[in-house]
Amino acid sequence: MSEFLKIATLLFGFATIFNVKDLLAVSKQAHTAKKPNVLFVISDDQSFPHTSAYGYKAVNTPAFDRVAKSGVLFTNAYSASPGCSPSRAAILTGMNDWQLEEAGTHASSFSSKYLVYPDILEKAGYFVGYTGKGWSPGNWEISGRKRNPAGTEYNSIKLKNTPEGVSNNDYAANFESFLSKKASDKPFCFWFGAAEPHRVFSKGIGLRSGKKLKDAVVPSFLPDNPEVRSDILDYCYEIEWYDKYLGRILDMLEKSGELNNTIIIVTSDNGMAFPRAKANTYEFGIHVPLAISWPGHIKRKKINQVVSLVDIAPTILEATGVKIPDTAYPMAGKSLLGVLTGKLKPSSVNAMRLEVYSSRERHSFARWNNLGYPQRAVRTGDYLYIRNFKPELWPAGDPQKLEKSDVTGKLQPGKMYGAFHDIDASPTLDFIIEKNSVRNIAPFFNWAVEKRPAEELFNVKKDPGCLNNLAQQPKFLTIKTGIKTKLENYLLATKDPRMLGRGDVFETYPRYEGVSRDFPNN
């Protein structure tokens, strides 16, 4: 029999079993099944060094390490903002926060005109959901959205008798519930947003769990004493708490045979909730952990070049083969897929960024009239340059007022209209406030709360704590001018209102969540 007759006979045989519509359905199902799944994992307030994959002794993160060892470990990943909701908005949209109006501030709204990658993937046939903390805090309903920008919520399964401070969300069980509702022919896109290590911590839980004070490495901007070390150990305990649920999810994927067909991205929204870290565009506020794996597609390596979390959305879309929609609000992020797969060398100019940008407007309600503390930052080479647009404001929030005593008529400490509310309440903050008059503690208090100059420049390789401001030193003038020009050109190109004389628009965006405080006009 000729080859032609063999093929014709085979096709006829198929046609007697399936009609043409059935054959097309089978073909479509097979094609869809080959689409990779997406698991995006984000912790809440975790700085770069604090996983065991980076060599930090006080914390043990086998699940994060597992992702890093099977894929790419980034040593210089930066968030778009040092605060929760603006950082998450940037990840979801692939855009800079100053391009996102209300969503670029804290606890406001999130206009539906800004496309998010979970919605884009859902339209392309993906089953989409999230557990834990999605885009938050903020009011997505008032924006006309039908659900959280991270996807459909799966938060109903709770734990019993959890330690103080950690979430009672059974993240792994909720992920399993999500999978049980997914059609077998659909790929999934899932957002696992851990509530840890966001404060409040159970004080002393790190030590009670067996951790040692000697293993806590204290950053240079914090005082090195047992109180602070214990606070750091409590923070490490919470990182381990969420990591064990990530481990359960990875095991679940492996057991189901989906692990090798899943792109896994693990990072954090911003840095640790300690003074001069979170809510600041210093290293410990924006430098975050990042590991990405996709077995069989991503080559194992460590990458030291700078990368931004705005690159996550375009990377996911390219990896899944989903075209970025044409929109009036294009993504500023750059896909990392070429570097991840080895098709492009990390050092290639076309592959990686030469600099990354971060910004901050409003964090908590910490000043009169809900004023923020606007910052823009660029990290390039060994340097971090920061532009403080309102140096006349207090960066951590308005301090205690002095007022006349009704009894003596003399000035004395008065009502706490605000007490550095841009720093999360903590034993470390209490310590530096209570001991701020002690000579060896005063510098740490001042570094955290005192007013800052309009320009700051740090060599982060030599000074990761960002304490030695080089901006006014003559020998760094050429370096500063070059980096400043890069920042200003990028802000202008991306139409940042702060550079276009319309910066006060950020102060007009309503705040929907958080404590409202009564401040006098400063």
Image (cartoon, rainbow, N blue to C red):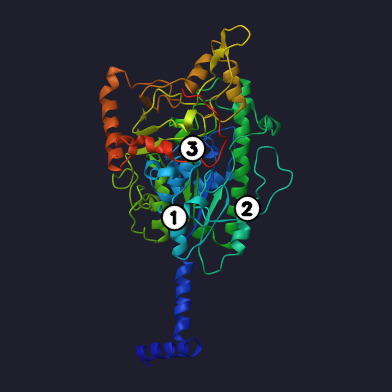
Residue at the spot of label 3: 83
499 to the left or right of 66: left
Residue 320 spot, x, y in % from top left:
42, 60
Three-letter code, disc 2? Asn
How many numbered tags mark residues here?
3
For label 3, the SS is: loop
Query: Which numbered marker is on residue 117?
Result: 1
421 to the left or right of 326: right
Residue 321 spot, x, y in % from top left:
39, 61
At x 56%, y 68%, the residue is 183
Residue at the spot of label 2: 155
For label 1, the SS is: helix
Label 1 vs 3, first from the N-terminus: 3
Task: Using the numbered discs, state the Cα–Cα distance from disc 1 to disc 3 in whole angstroms.
Answer: 20 Å
Task: Using the numbered discs, state the Cα–Cα distance from disc 1 to disc 2 in whole angstroms.
Answer: 21 Å
In front: 286, or 496? 496
Res 327 → quadrant: bottom left
Can the viewer see residue 441? no
